[in-house]
Image (spheres, rainbow, N blue to C red):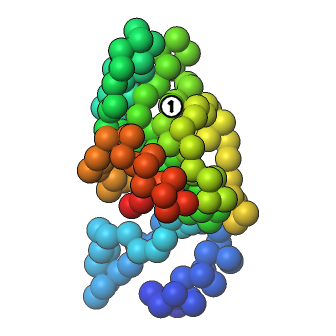
Amino acid sequence: MYGFDGLRNRAFARKHGPVFVVPRFDGKLCPCILGFVEFLTMAQPLTTADERAQLLANGTARAAGQSIDPLPVVRLFTPDAHATWLLAALDPADGDTAYGLIDLGIRMPALGTVKLSDLAAIVGPQQRPVLRDLYFRASRPLSEYVRLAQRDGSIPD
């Protein structure tokens, strides 16, 4: 019987592959899911529908030549490679090219563009995909994140 300590969970995952771990207490299923991201079998989307709509709205304003300093909408990251993307706009022409602050983990964050389809295909050294930070809420405009990231060498949390 596999327990819920980390060693036995990892042993279970190695033996059975990535699975949902649903514990039982007194013979009853517990609705919570234990484990880490690597146990999940379904990849989460890089953006929600609401985030995509906001990214497209910001992208439309940028394409129209408006001078905007939006709040970043979504934070994407590689859990095993220290890369982070703080995205603020999405090109309305193709719906795939995102604009924002890019930090590839080499202490040189910069503004740039990246295709969401490329990010969806990336996996880190431990074969973990790019993930969306579910708890990210921008606390400052993109320009302030850029200033702090260039000063510190990485995107602030």
Q: Which residue is mark 1?
A: 99
Q: Position of residue 89 (x, y in %)?
A: 43, 28
Choose between 110 and 126: the one closer to the eye. 110
Relative placement, left or right, of 124 versus 50 is right
Q: Position of residue 5 (x, y in %)?
A: 47, 90
**Residue type at the position of mark 1:** Tyr
Choose between 71 and 144: the one closer to the eye. 144
Q: Quadrant of residue 119?
A: top right
Q: Position of residue 72 (x, y in %)?
A: 36, 40
* Viewer can see residue 48: no
In the image, is residue 156 above or below residue 50?
below
At 67% from the left edge and 47% from the top edge, which residue is drawn?
A: 122
Q: Tag count in the figure?
A: 1
Relative placement, left or right, of 91 versus 25 is right
Q: Secondary structure at mark 1?
A: strand
Q: Position of residue 32 (x, y in %)?
A: 32, 70
At 34% from the left edge and 53% from the top edge, which residue is drawn?
A: 136
Neighbour class for label 1 at 10 Å: few (<14), some, many (≥20)? many
Quick one: quadrant of the C terminus?
Answer: bottom left
At 32% from the left edge and 56% from the top edge, which residue is drawn?
A: 135
